Amino acid sequence: MQIIVKKKDPAVIVSIQGHFNVGAAPEFERIFNQHLDAGERRFVLNLAELTFISSAGLCSLLATAKKIKEQDGNLVICALQGEARKVFEISGFAALFSMYSTEAVALKQV
Amino acid sequence: MKTAPLTFRRTSLAVKLGLMVLTGTSLVFAAAFFYNHVLSRRNILRNAETNARNLAGATVSRIEAVLNGVEKTPGYMALCLEQRAWERADLLAFIRNGLVANPDIFGSIVAFEPYAFDPHSRFFAPYYCRQGADIRQTWLGSDQYQYFNLDWYILPKELKRAVWSEPYFDEGGGKVIMTTYSVPFYRLLNGQRQFQGIVTADIALDWLVKMVTSVSYLKTGFAFLISQNGVFVTHPDKRLIMRESIFDLAEGAANERLRQVGQDMVRGGTGFVHLESPSFGKPSWLYYAPLKSPGWSLGVLFPEDELFADAQRMGRNILLIGLVGFAGLFLIIVLISAAVTRPIRALARTTAEIARGNLEIKLPLVKSHDEVGELSYAFDNMRVALKEYIAGLTEATAARERLESELKIARTIQMSFLPKHFPPFPEQAEFDLFARLEPAKQVGGDLYDFFLLDDQHLFFSIGDVADKGVPAALFMAVTKTLMKGIAMQGGQDPASVLEHVNLELCKENDSMMFVTVFCAMLNFRTGELVYSNAGHNPPLIRRAGGRPDDLPLPKGIILGTIEEARYTTASLTLHAGDTLVLYTDGVTEAMNPSQDLYSLERLRETVTGVSDQDPKTMVDAIFQSVHAYASGAPQSDDITVLTLHYHG
Amino acid sequence: MLLTNAHRLLLLVGLIFLSGTLALKAASADAKPCVLVPQWEPQAQFAGYYVAVEKGIYARHGLTVTVLRGGPDQPIGRLLQEGQADFATTFLTSALEKRSLDGLPLVNIAQMVQRSSLLLVARKSSGIRSPADLQGKTVSLWPDFAVQPKALFRKFGVAPRVLTQGATINLFLRGAVDAASGMWYNEYHMLINSGLEEQDLTVFFYDQFGLNFPEDGIYCLAPTLKQDPDRCRRFVQASIAGWQYAFQHPEEALDIVMRQVTAANRPTNRVHQRWMLNRMKDIMQPPGALPLGTLTEADYLRVARELKSAGQINTIPAWNEFYENCAIDIPTNQPGR
């Protein structure tokens, strides 16, 4: 997995490429914690290039989202597709997150 | 021998250095010593030969001077006897005068051939000899004393030349060794030179014995004289004199070399030879030179060790000095190198301590800025690094051990909650059920369950807790227990069970743990199946003789996140020969070494490939296929499969 | 003189017999005194006798034996005749000559040396390889031992120039003669130990040419034997035992010989005497030899005939009168001769 972070006002855009499994979870959470500590509150998670997410990945995502929410932040997801989108739907995650088709839309809504 | 190399390896650098330097200097010293030894030996030998030659030469000259003087008288007499016929009285006076004129001569004969002097007398041999201060005359020759056959007569006669006889003891039986010089004389008769007789001069050799005996060389070296037959005429060992020849001596001592030397001596040779002397019983040197006129040989014999005694003493002293010097040198080298290597040894002791695990020990302070100082500094850095590394390692090990024990606990919790008795309901012929959970190393949280609600309803479920370790295991246990408890209350459809369970799980769920669950109730009498889903993968359904398909699922969110989540119950009817395959994403998301997923397609193919109706066969086939695909790649998630075959 | 002495002896014998056989037996039970005179100066040639004295072998045989110093001054004939000696050793040829020429009634009571020790030695460098090569050469011979060489010369039809050989071998050593006589046990070794090499010498042993003359034998006068044959047997048997002891213990025998040699102030040495003792063994016990003491009539006749044809003796004594083997016992019930 590769995580790319870029700052694009008003949010921090985090892009995940490849597999999001148990091995990737700590790095994922560390990045978000780091930005939360730095005072960022708005996040866009770009999952255009996410090829797979495991239950551990979902767990990590859920935990992160809840932490952001607790600090009055907001996390939105964009560009989810393919197998990963199916997982989100089956697991009911799709109902838990605000999901947008493109990064640009997500940036406006975050 | 076994310990020798070990000992050497243990030998300190100082000693090694000392030994090496010592070996080098010893070689140089040995070479110089050997060269000096060889050279001085050669010189000593050359000097010895010269001295022995001079000694022998002087002795020989003195003896020959006397012998030559003696030879003159009978020689002159023979000459005179050849000149003319002699009157008896003249002849007697002539012989007597010869004796008077030459005091070295003890006696003298003029012996004639039979009837040669006096046609009437067979024997004519007047003999003059000294008796005290007087000179006496006797007549030799009788039937008993036929002088013609005696050596002194017949030898010069036959050899036609003057001859010195072999030495002999005097007639009187005294102890005086004598020898006789015999000269043949001839007369011209009828124009032919005819042998007439012999003139002799007897001399005592006591002076010669004394002279030769007085010769000494080195400490015990001596001179000796042997006759032409090799018989000892003089020798310090009196028993040999006139009794034994040099060849007897050689035979007695089985000394072939001595025999060869003796042969050269009696042949008149000169030589300086090395031999094992029976006289000394040790290696000796012999110089020998002939006394030409009598054909005797004078030898000067001396033991080799005396010859080289001085050289040997000198050699010994040099060796001693060398040894003491080397010992001193060795000591100095060892002391110097000990001083040089002391910090290294201290370092070695310290590192040995470090090697034993004591990383707290301070390295000895080395003030010098040489290699030893650098080494010491580097060692200290190493020690500190090692200490930190070990500390880190200890911590990591502890953490891993903690984690591992936690995982073990988690697995034990998880596994102990699962029903593991198969077939679970042997009395129910309507269906067969088999399930297996293969826990991953790190992730625990899969669950399956089945139980009879009443005599016609089977409840079965599968789930996956999205976390790891003990919390996940506990969460799984809670989920399973809740689900069973709620389902067993009766009168509830699967969606209702899920809603109740969700509500319970959402309470106090601070860690944001969730679980996906698929649960179903089968009326195994009718085949009616009702089911609901909370975010779990859709199970596969294979209708009798058909291909597997995803079971159509109603939407339903994962359990444990949203309290007001609502679930829907779906239903369908199973017919005889239908098979349900419930699984967790551990199956489809199993990875091979290049991190490709096993995928739903492969699962479908595998399920299609199994014609057997035994659910265990199906489960085995799936696990086998997944393992084969993973080809040893580590399993990252629990793998769970539950298969139900409906017989109707 | 001889007859007178013989008569005297006979008279003495008679007197002894008169005085009674008991007395004689008593005397023999004690130790009978005997005197032996060897034909030459002390040397290993007589080792057996010296050993028999010193090792008490004679004493064990009931004899008290004195060995006189032999040599040119002690002619055995005279000593036997004068009664100064009872027994003597000498060559078979010498015994025959003495018996023939001096009329001495010598009886051989044991033949000790079976094989001629006398030899003729030549330098190979003189071109002498066989007796035939002696033609035209100069040879020195001992007058007393000239029968064998002259028979050899006749046999090979050679006529070398013959010189009289004296007491030394210097004629040969100095090259004055091409060949010389010698005893194997004596002169031959002297040549070797004057520096000559054996391989440079040609040696003719007479037994190789059918001229073997047995040499040393033990002799006594006929009356001595007649008067007390028992004493003679004891003497011979003890002497043989002495020899056997000497051959078995050569170094001890040499010690004894050297004591005799030293006492006689002889110019010889142990090495030479060792050689002599070894050669005595060779010529007394040559391979296939008869027991010590034996003289065969054939040997006797050959020697006697050669001596007669050489003119050394006039008559050949009767075999039975000349030889009585005292080495073997005659049963006591049979009276001795």
Image (cartoon, coloured by chain):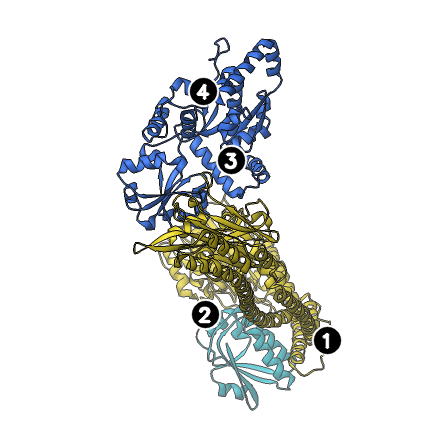
Camera-near label (2 vs 4) is 4
Q: Which chain is cyan?
A: A
Q: Which chain is blue?
A: C
What's the mark number on residue A56? none
| Label 2: chain letter | B
Disc 3 is placed on an element classified as: loop
Q: Spatial distance from mark 1 to mark 4, Cα to Cα?
A: 111 Å
**Looking at the picture, which amino acid does disc 2 mark?**
Gln
Q: Are marks 3 and 2 on the same chain?
A: no
- Chain B drawn colour: yellow
Q: Is residue B495 above or below residue B160?
A: below
**Looking at the picture, which amino acid does disc 4 mark?**
Asn
Q: Which residue is mark 3?
A: C71
Disc 4 is placed on an element classified as: loop
Q: Are marks 1 and 2 on the same chain?
A: yes
Q: Which residue is mark 1?
A: B364
Give the image location of residue B461, x and y in percent.
53, 58
What's the mark number on residue C325? 4
Q: Which residue is rendered at x = 54% and y = 81% of the image?
A: A76
Q: Is residue B252 above or below residue C118?
A: below
Disc 2 is placed on an element classified as: loop
Q: Which residue is mark 2?
A: B595
> Label 4: how many residues lie within 10 Å, few (<14), some (14-19) or many (20+)?
many
| Label 1: chain letter | B
Give the image location of residue C206, x and y in percent.
35, 35
Say which label, 4 or 3, has the lower sequence index. 3
**Looking at the picture, which amino acid does disc 1 mark?**
Pro
The answer to whether any part of residue B270 appears in the image is yes
